[in-house]
Image (cartoon, grey):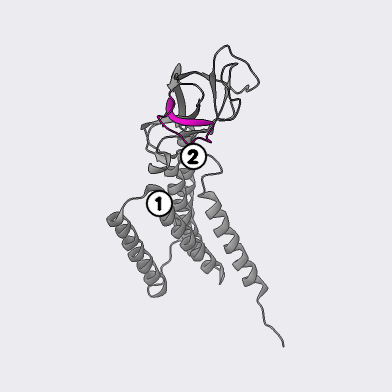
Amino acid sequence: MKFDIDSGKLLYALGIAFAAAALLYFVRDVVFGLSITVKAVLLLLAAVGFFLGGLAAERDVLDAVGFVLAAVTYVVFVGYVVVRYQPGGTATFLVLAISAALTLALGYLLRERDLSLPRRTVAASVGVVLVLGIALVGADVAVGGVTYASDFESSVTVTAPDSVPDDQQYFERDVRVGRLTATNGPVFTRALSLPELSGCLVGTDAGFREDVWLSYENRYDQADTIAGGATRQLTIRASLPVDLNETRSMTYAVERGSDCDADRASPTLLVQLGEE
């Protein structure tokens, strides 16, 4: 059996597939460190650029490749905006409806009206798209990203519960030990990437020399984005052990640090944020 495969079209198809994969990786907020706002606008500009490239292509198939890349990029743009900005039901419907009307209108103009532009106009338009993209990236870098500042209690006190099972050696109390303040620069919405929390107990009277569970209160009940110029505060909580052989309350000093082999004269909770 003989297969008639157009190798050129096959390579075009692979190129489109790789382009789609690159776009999806781009919107995962793991590369370049750009804001959500600028990434969304860059996707839209890329869609416009691919569409203009399709209009300028003179060879058969190349124009189709340009239009397919424009369509794929625009779909990724719409999905990214809906997922990251979470505009709500009505706004999402409007975005999808406008997108449907826009794509249908462009398809009609291409198929029925033989839409075309002079090459000089296309070249100038592509130049404008590139300048806008570069300006946005420059502004994004100049404005700066999200900054994080922490504020911890000097000490916290935990008490034993009124009743516990007989075979239980110790009990953990969930207490507030500090807070993290995230501040975003102006204009651009950004992804909120909270520093990882870790901690341990030190001190000759602590009774436990082990890792301590720390977390941000209600972290997953809030959006993982922060608007331009906004400030958000998150409470930091720790699960601290209580020695059930003691009837008195237990007080832990709270310090920033990561040296869990250190010693203290009194029980101390060492808290580490990120890679500090």
**Residue wearing tag 2:** 137
Q: Position of residue 271 (x, y in %)?
A: 53, 25
Q: Quadrant of the N terminus?
A: bottom right
**Residue at the disc numbered 1:** 81
Is 220 left, or right, of 206 in this rendering?
left
Camera-nearest residue between 260 and 143: 260
In terms of depth relative to the viewer, which is nearer, 74 or 249? 249
- Residue 5, above or below 15: below
Contact (Cβ within 8 Å) of mark 1 with mark 2: no
**Looking at the image, can residue 20 be seen?**
yes
**Residue 32, position as x, y percentages in the image:** 55, 41
Q: Nearer the viewer, mark 1 or mark 2?
A: 1
Residue at image coords 52%, 67%? 63
Give the amino acid at mark 1.
Answer: Val
Of the numbered discs 1 and 2, the one sitting upstream in the chain is 1
Measured in 3D between alpha carbons, the distance from the residue under mark 1 to the one under mark 2, in whole angstroms, is 18 Å
Which label belongs to residue 260?
A: none
In what element is the residue under mark 2? helix
* Residue 240 magenta-highlighted: no
Q: What's drawn in magenta, residue-wise?
A: 159-178
Looking at the rendered structure, the kind of residue marked 2 is: Val
Picture layout, residue 246 above or below residue 274 = above
User: Furthest residue to the top?
Assistant: 265
Extreme residue toward the right, this view:
1
Q: Quadrant of the C terminus?
A: top right
Residue neighbourhood size for the residue with mark 1, other residues' Cα within 10 Å, grouped as few (<14), some (14–19), many (≥20): many
Q: Give how far across and how far down residue 54 sits, in percent.
A: 50, 64
**On the image, which quarter does residue 110 sit in?**
bottom left
Where 124 sits versus 204, above or below?
A: below
Element on which disc 1 rests: helix
